């Protein structure tokens, strides 16, 4: 039998106390102005029963309170949960229907949180979430509702404002606060967040506003993370496209829709092909060829990047090993791009090792290209991973150098072998300025640090000449060859094998 609770239990204890009082009052005139012993006992029993009932009721109320708190709050951080957030959002929208005020949702998703969980463990992941919750709490106004929606997603309800200005200010405070490394006791971790902001009007519903803010958050991710984006209605159709892309991506690998193309890396002095950079292409069944810039961020978000990365490593290593067997006279290298989340994943080392073992490619022939953003995001983890990769014997290249942080300290801190100078510097070479000072400086810097230099994006003869004379050893670009299908790359090597060094072997494919 279930114990009585709620209002009925309240009535019962009140009734018992009242009965005790009635007994006492009723007896007084009957027995010489004083109640008899029996009547006193009856009254005492009734009173005790009543107060025991009240205590029980208080206990029950406390439990009910706790259960209610659990139902509407997040166990890890104590913040409001999705249910409470949605409820407050609906209420806020009802209130603005009667005023000229606005309601905004600030949607926050941590960048690369999965990496922390994977590399430092779930306990550390939990501490990180708690730490972030504390930072967010400091960034909101007392009247705003801050909630953890789940995983590494948070939302802030910003009420009674005009337009999205207040929400933008909150987003700026959040991003600024997260720029400091977080101290998790045994580790210091760098995180950033992508933030989407949507402001509701009279036609908004709670779910539409939350979805719009979520949508804008994905745009912030797409635009490079660590920033906020304010929603606009054109993003809705883009969101539908993105969802489709996500679904299609799951099928791409099992259905063999990926392929690699190979862009030759040419020795500027001998003009011979000394290696390739493997570039990923997706032959989408309806969209045609999709470039990695478009689908890799999506693959990263849905957790497919490690699998795709492993496939690329295997394919590229196998192709290079095959070409090396056919042309043992060329010390052919194969460069593979490694994304930030791949570097964060503990699987990377295993995937590289397996690709080398399965293909038989000597480790020194494999070049892994990293961008500086990888190193900035989590320098401690990056340094550790780079050390492990180096222990495997592979070479490391710093890709797109000069476009991002271009920090000289990175070059010293993260021992790399190759510096790839971004095409944006190469394109500054023209008739007027043969060798712009900054380009010359980059090349000299690389040479001083004993790095191999690859100039990217060479399209003109003039650029080739100046870079060669300026001391850039290697280059790639359309002047030599566009990215080639595997068979064409094989033919290029065959053609080169037939022509002695010094003859113009690479040029015919331009
Ligand atoms: Mg690259």
Image (cartoon, grey):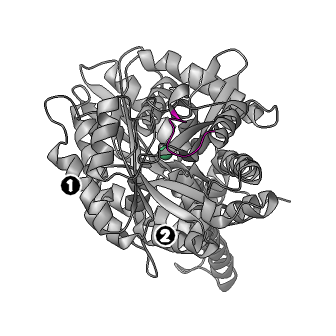
Identify which residue is drawn at 53% across, 30% down: 294
In which image quadrant can residue 44 be found? Answer: bottom right
User: Of helix, strand and loop, which one carries label 1?
Assistant: helix
Q: Is residue 14 above or below residue 217?
A: below
Q: Main secondary structure of the magenta part?
A: loop
Q: Which mark is residue 441?
A: 1
Dividing the image into 4 quarters, which one contains the N terminus?
Answer: bottom right
Residue 370 visible in the snapshot: yes
Identify which residue is drawn at 56% across, 57% down: 367
Q: Which mark is residue 357?
A: none
Q: Is residue 29 magenta?
A: no
User: Could you tell me how far apart the alpha carbons at marks 2 and 1 are, in whole angstroms?
Assistant: 30 Å
Q: Circle 1: is it few (<14), some (14-19), or many (20+) Cα within 10 Å?
A: few
Look at the image and give the residue range highlighted in magenta: 499-506
Q: Report if the beta carbon of the residue with label 2 is closer than 8 angstroms to ligand 1.
A: no
User: Of helix, strand and loop, which one carries label 2?
Assistant: helix
Q: Is residue 183 above or below residue 436?
A: below
Q: Circle 2: is it few (<14), some (14-19), or many (20+) Cα within 10 Å?
A: many
The tag earlier along the polypeptide, 2 or 1, is 2
Identify which residue is drawn at 69% across, 47% down: 316
Residue of label 2: 381
């Amino acid at each position: 039998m279930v114990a009585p609770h709620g209002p009925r239990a309240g009535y019962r204890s009140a009734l018992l106390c009242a009965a005790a009082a009635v007994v006492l009052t009723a007896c007084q005139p009957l027995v010489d102005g004083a109640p008899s012993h029996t009547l006193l006992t009856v009254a005492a029993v009734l009173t005790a029963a009543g107060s025991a009932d009240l205590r029980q009721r208080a206990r029950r109320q406390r439990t009910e309170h706790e259960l209610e708190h659990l139902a509407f709050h997040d166990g890890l951080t104590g913040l409001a949960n999705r249910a409470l957030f949605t409820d407050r959002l609906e209420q806020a929208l009802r209130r603005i229907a009667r005023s000229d005020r606005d309601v905004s949702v600030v949607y926050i998703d941590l960048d690369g949180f999965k990496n922390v969980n994977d590399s430092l463990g779930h306990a550390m992941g939990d501490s990180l979430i708690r730490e972030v919750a504390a930072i967010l709490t400091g960034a909101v106004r007392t009247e705003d509702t801050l909630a953890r929606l789940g995983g590494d997603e948070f939302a802030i309800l910003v009420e009674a404002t005009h337009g999205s200005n207040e929400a933008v200010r909150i987003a700026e405070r959040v991003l600024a606060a997260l720029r400091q490394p977080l101290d998790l006791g045994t580790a210091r971790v760098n995180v950033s967040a992508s933030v989407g902001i949507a402001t509701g009007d009279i036609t908004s519903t709670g779910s539409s506003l939350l979805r719009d803010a979520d949508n804008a958050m994905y745009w912030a991710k797409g635009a490079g993370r660590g920033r906020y984006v304010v929603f606009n209605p054109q993003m809705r159709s883009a969101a539908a496209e993105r969802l489709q892309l996500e679904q299609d991506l799951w099928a791409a690998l099992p259905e063999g829709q990926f392929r690699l193309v190979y862009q030759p890396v040419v020795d500027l002095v001998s003009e011979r092909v000394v290696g390739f950079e493997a570039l990923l292409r997706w032959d989408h069944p309806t969209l045609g060829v999709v470039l990695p810039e478009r689908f890799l961020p999506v693959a990263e978000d849905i957790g497919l990047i490690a699998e795709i990365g492993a496939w690329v490593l295997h394919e590229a290593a196998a192709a290079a090993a095959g070409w090396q067997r056919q042309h043992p006279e060329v010390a052919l290298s194969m460069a593979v791009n490694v994304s930030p989340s791949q570097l964060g994943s503990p699987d990377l080392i295993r995937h590289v090792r397996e690709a080398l073992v399965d293909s038989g490619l000597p480790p020194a022939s494999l070049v892994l290209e990293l961008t500086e953003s990888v190193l900035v995001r989590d320098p401690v983890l990056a340094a550790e991973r780079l050390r492990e990769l180096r222990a495997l014997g592979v070479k490391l290249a710093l890709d797109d150098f000069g476009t991002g942080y271009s920090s000289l300290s990175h070059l010293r801190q993260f021992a790399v072998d190759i510096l790839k100078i971004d095409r944006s510097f190469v394109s500054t070479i023209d008739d007027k300025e043969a060798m712009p000072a900054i380009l010359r400086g980059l090349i000299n810097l690389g040479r001083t640090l004993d790095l191999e230099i690859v100039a990217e994006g060479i399209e003109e003869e003039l650029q080739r000449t100046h870079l060669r004379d300026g001391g850039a050893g290697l280059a790639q670009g359309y002047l030599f060859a566009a990215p080639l299908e595997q068979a064409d790359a094989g033919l290029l090597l065959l053609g080169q094998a037939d022509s002695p060094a010094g003859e113009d072997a690479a040029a015919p494919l331009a």
